[in-house]
Image (cartoon, rainbow, N blue to C red):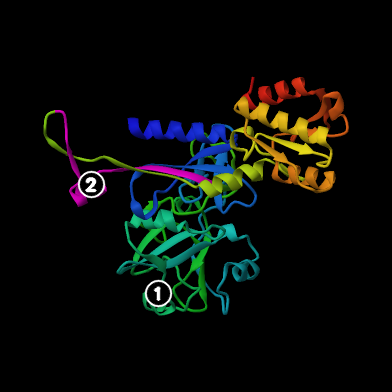
């Protein structure tokens, strides 16, 4: 635990220095197993990951791990008798909504999965999706996939689209919301038929009631009951504990202070360097290009010489270049034979934090001082510009 916390703190320092706005979220450790899994996520509309978070209490998790809290349904209707109704060619939730003229949340959706060598039925509310990571972890199976048509027909005696929990001969696992539902519609395990007014505990039951669904925007926070928000994110780091799972299997041991052999305690720690750079740019840019934070900028300062045929401009630029280097500043000198506008555009595009422009006032010892994150420049003496650049870079 101490090593894990030390690594966690180190990751936080790294991402803080990168000036990233990130969140630490609960996560699944995947096929490697382990515990205490956490991901470092940067919120971004282009992110491939989905994260759920609560602004009230700070709860955060990725969509694979996010816990779903069922909210009791407010329904004062009596429990009606379950009835079998003919529903020819009505197979999907969309078809059922039109046929019964009701919302998808009033249906119970039964899906059959092949989990290693067994077939299991999973039931969620009609407007929900099964979280296959949660299901796989619950079943402790190596392979999980939706059952093929032949398997569905064999298990339900009906075509795909008509599976239901009543009289089902395979193992049934239901989501936490199913017992909270009332008078809902389910498949009848009979092609072309559904049951309406079904109720858990009366018409079908199982002891396996588990959180199996994907969390959605507006769900209740599992910690405080507040509102869950959903956002896309880029995973820049992932840490989790492996314990002795692999060291025991590989007989990887060490001698403790008493001379006794002990299995090595392991952990998994990864940082996506490319993802981190992409995230920094995603959070630090404008219409002109990148706005690098000083800590990760390719160079701290760029010197732009307006006219490299002017000896005074070139001499002053070289002096500034050497003075900044002597002060430990990483500096780039743009002395290309290009128009000034091209040099300025390139400087903004690449995003150097500070730009010093040596132009027509070089003979007076005056340069332009401009921060990349600001719109306007300031004329300064060379001494003042150097001092300002050093202070900005070193955070003085």
With respect to residue 14, does 336 lie above or below? below
**How much space separates mark 2 and mark 1, taking CA atoms?**
44 Å
The quarter of the displayed image where residue 146 is located:
bottom left
Query: Residue 222: in sight, yes or no?
Result: yes
Identify the mark at residue 247; answer none if there is no mark.
2
Residue 40: percent from left, percent from top: 50, 41
Using the image as rendered, state which of residue 194 and residue 367 is in the foreground: 367
Residue 190: percent from left, percent from top: 46, 77
At a point 48% along the width and 50% down the height, the residue shown is 180
All told, the count of numbered labels is 2
Query: Residue 218: in sight, yes or no?
Result: no
With respect to residue 297, does 125 lie above or below? below
125 left or right, relative to 313:
left
The quarter of the displayed image where residue 390 is located:
top right
Residue where numbered disc 1 is placed: 156
6 left or right, relative to 286:
left
Tag 1 secondary structure: helix
Please, which residue is most extreme toward the left here?
A: 259
The quarter of the displayed image where residue 298 is located:
top right
Precedes in sequence: disc 2 or disc 1: 1
Identify the mark at residue 348; answer none if there is no mark.
none
Using the image as rendered, state which of residue 291 and residue 19 is in the foreground: 291
The magenta region covers: 235-257
At a point 59% along the width and 51% down the height, the residue shown is 47
């Amino acid at each position: 635990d101490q090593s894990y916390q030390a690594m966690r703190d180190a990751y936080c320092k790294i991402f803080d220095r990168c000036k990233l706005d990130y969140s630490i979220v609960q996560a699944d450790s995947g096929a490697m197993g382990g515990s205490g899994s956490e991901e470092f996520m940067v919120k971004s509309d282009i992110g491939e990951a989905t994260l759920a978070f609560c602004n009230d209490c700070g709860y955060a998790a990725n969509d694979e791990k996010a816990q779903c809290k069922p909210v009791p349904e407010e329904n004062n209707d009596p429990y009606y008798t379950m009835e079998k109704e003919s529903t020819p060619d009505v197979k999907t939730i969309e078809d059922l909504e039109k046929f019964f003229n009701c919302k998808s949340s009033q249906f119970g959706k039964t899906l059959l999965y092949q989990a290693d060598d067994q077939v299991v039925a999973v039931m969620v509310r009609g407007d929900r999706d099964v979280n296959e990571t949660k299901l796989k972890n619950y079943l402790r199976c190596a392979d999980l996939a939706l059952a093929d048509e032949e398997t569905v027909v064999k298990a339900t005696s009906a075509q795909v689209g008509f599976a239901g929990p009543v009289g089902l001969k395979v193992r049934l696992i239901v989501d936490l919301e199913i017992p909270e539902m009332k008078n809902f519609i389910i498949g009848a395990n009979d092609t072309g038929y559904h049951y309406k007014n079904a109720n858990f505990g009366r018409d079908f039951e199982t002891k396996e009631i588990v959180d199996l669904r994907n969390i959605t925007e507006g769900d209740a926070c599992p910690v405080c009951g507040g509102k869950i928000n959903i956002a896309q994110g880029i995973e820049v780091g992932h840490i989790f504990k492996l314990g002795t799972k692999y060291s025991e299997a590989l007989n990887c041991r060490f001698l403790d202070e008493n001379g006794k052999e002990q299995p090595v305690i392991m952990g998994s720690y990864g940082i996506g360097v490319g993802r981190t750079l992409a995230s920094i740019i995603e959070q630090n840019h404008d219409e002109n290009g990148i706005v690098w934070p000083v800590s990760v900028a390719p160079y701290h300062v760029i010197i732009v010489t307006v006219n490299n045929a002017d000896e005074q401009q070139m001499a002053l630029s070289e002096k500034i270049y050497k003075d900044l280097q002597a002060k430990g500043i990483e500096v780039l000198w743009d002395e290309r034979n290009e128009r000034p506008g091209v040099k300025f555009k390139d400087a903004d595009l690449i995003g150097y934090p500070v730009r010093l422009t040596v132009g027509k006032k070089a003979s007076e010892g005056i340069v332009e001082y401009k921060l990349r994150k600001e719109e306007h420049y300031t004329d300064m003496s060379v001494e003042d510009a150097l001092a300002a650049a050093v202070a900005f870079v070193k955070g003085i």
